[in-house]
Image (spheres, grey):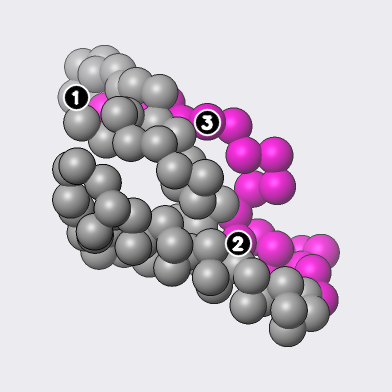
Amino acid sequence: MISGLNHPNLVKLYGCCVEKNQLMLVYEYMENNSLALALFGKSSLKLQWEVRQNICVGIARGLEFLHEGSMIRMVHRDIKPVTCF
């Protein structure tokens, strides 16, 4: 279901694998890593307010798509910098 979602502000889920008692999800490679690493990592970035606003708007657009715009409506329930790529 989730792998069928397509939106520019969502990371693409390609598939999953179950190995013994472990579930692994295969996502699109995100070169810049997570928002948490950019904000709190060893070489954290000094993001200008316009960049921060663009990040927030992108996250909001992705959530709006999940809540209202897709055929499969869902709620993320765990939005935080480490889950934003």
**x, y (%) of residue 25?**
36, 29
Residue under numbered circle 3: 28
Left/right placement of residue 28 relative to residue 60 reads right
Magenta-highlighted residues: 23-46
Confirm whether the magenta stretch covers residue 29. Answer: yes
In the image, what residue occupies the spot 42% across and 57% down?
Answer: 62
Classify mark 2: helix, strand or loop.
helix
Q: Does the magenta stretch include residue 66?
A: no
Q: Tell me where residue 79 sits by quadrant.
A: bottom left
> Mark 1 or mark 2: which comes first in sequence?
1
Residue 20 appears at what percent x and percent y? 21, 17
Please tell me whether residue 17 is drawn above or below residue 32 in the rendered image: above
Task: Give the vertical position of 6 relative to 63 (above or below).
Answer: above
Q: Residue 35 carries which label?
A: 2
Q: Between marks 3 and 1, how big is the CA–CA gap?
A: 23 Å
Q: Which amino acid does label 3 sit on?
A: Glu
- Image coordinates of residue 46 in percent, x first then y, are 81, 76
- Characterize the local packing of mark 2: few (<14), some (14-19) or many (20 or more) Cα atoms within 10 angstroms: some
Label 1, on which residue?
Answer: 21
- Tell me which label, 2 or 3, sits earlier in the chain: 3
Tell me the mark number nearer the camera, choosing from 1 and 2: 2
Taking 52 as reference, is 2 left or right? left
Q: Which amino acid does label 1 sit on?
A: Asn
Inter-mark Cα distance, 2 to 3: 16 Å
Residue at point 79%, 79% (across, down): 48
